[in-house]
Image (tube, rainbow, N blue to C red):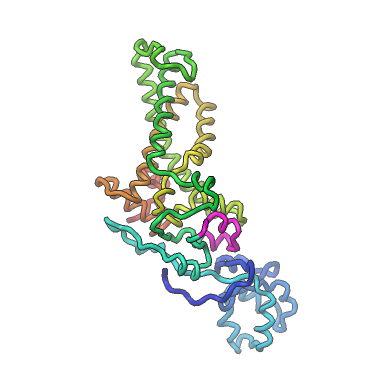
Amino acid sequence: MIADEKQPLLKPRMRICTLEDVAMHSTAQSCWIARKGRVYDITGFLQDHPGGDDIILKHAGKDVEEIMHDEAEHGHSDAAYDMMESYVIGRLGTTATIVDEAWEPQEDFHPDDTNAEEDFAQCQFLDLGKPLVSQVWDSNWTKAYYLQQVHQPRHLPEPARFFERSYLEVFTRTKWYVVPCVWLPIAAFLFYRSVTQFAGIDAPVFANPLDLPLSSIPVSCYLKTLICFFIGNLIWTFLEYTMHRFIFHVDEYLPDNRVFLTLHFLTHGVHHYLPMDRLRLVMPPVLFTTLSTPFTRLAHVLFPTAIANGIIAGSFTFYVLYDCMHYALHHTKLPEYMREMKKYHLAHHYKNFELGFGVTSKIWDYVFATVLPV
């Protein structure tokens, strides 16, 4: 990371902030300033300031180091600087960045490994040598500092550990082939159910297909299911885009408390923080089940059962394509189209994480004007 000035030592539980946090407190009701890497809440001092509160409010929400040494503006004694220490509430975190608009995709791109000790010493964010989730839960950062840091990619030679307990850790690690093994049979079963339902066959859920009169099912029933299946394919591409943009990247509306920061980290933040972690590139079945259940229920509310099952089968099939492709974009050699999508997706991580939300295609990025130039 880019070298940054040496930061002052932390007091216990002193919050790590950004200048963006400080700028949000620029009124008489909440007045913060920054100086030499520290953050001060001087709201209670405004009325006691010898030069009046107007001069402080003029510079509220800003770094005041330079202006405090400007004798023409307002001189300060050593005692004034000493008194400021009683108003310290936090410190400014590092402003070092990795994401860069000038980043250029390379055909054989693979980042260097992060020195975990140096990274933690500089950023005071996460110690990559320890379980991560408890650190996020017990963190002392503001939301702004969390979002700044979680979008700066780090890299480890082996998958990071989330939990101390192995029985929890196992649910966070998913090999890519688990996704097709779990979800393709389910998609095939739903396709089969859709066909039989279009044919008016009221078969039990676990009926043996060999016991059913499948040979007598009209071709039209298969065609109807195929149409629903392809509609499900299209619906998935839209869900892929909207979930990525409006659920996983809900940064602006994320409440500033540890519950929501931890949820954000678990669902998508960790992927931007450790984008090459090979066991965190596809969704664990539990997570996808949780995210997909509201949509599958909605499909059954909106459509007859046969249509809903056909659409869900198509959506699940394209989900498998999406997750396997996502893994491939990060880790494998690819054909021409996928090489272009790899450059596009890596640019989302290393160039601008506020654009380029499509993974399997750029269709909805064009529709909603979020295409990322690469």
- Residue closer to the observer: 107 or 304: 107
In-image side of 140 versus 282 (left or right): right
Give the x, y percent position of residue 258: 61, 55
Magenta stretch contains residue 142: yes
Please tell me whether residue 77 is drawn above or below residue 230 in the rendered image. Answer: below
Quadrant hosting residue 200? top left
- Residue closer to the observer: 86 or 45: 86
Give the x, y percent position of residue 180: 38, 36
Give the x, y percent position of residue 36: 56, 78
Quadrant hosting residue 44? bottom right
In-image side of 107 versus 197 (left or right): left
Q: Which residues are magenta?
A: 130-146
Give the quarter of the figure containing the C terminus.
Answer: bottom left
- Residue closer to the observer: 49 or 347: 347
Q: Residue at x 47, y 48 (%)?
A: 245
Q: Residue at x 51, y 46 (%)?
A: 247
Residue 369 visible in rendering: no
Please tell me whether residue 326 is drawn above or below residue 42 in the rendered image. Answer: above
Give the quarter of the figure containing the N terminus.
Answer: bottom left
- Residue closer to the observer: 303 or 282: 282
Please tell me whether residue 216 is drawn above or below residue 70 in the rendered image. Answer: above
Residue 306 visible in rendering: yes
Quadrant hosting residue 176? top left
Q: Residue at x 34, y 52 (%)?
A: 344
Magenta stretch contains residue 191: no
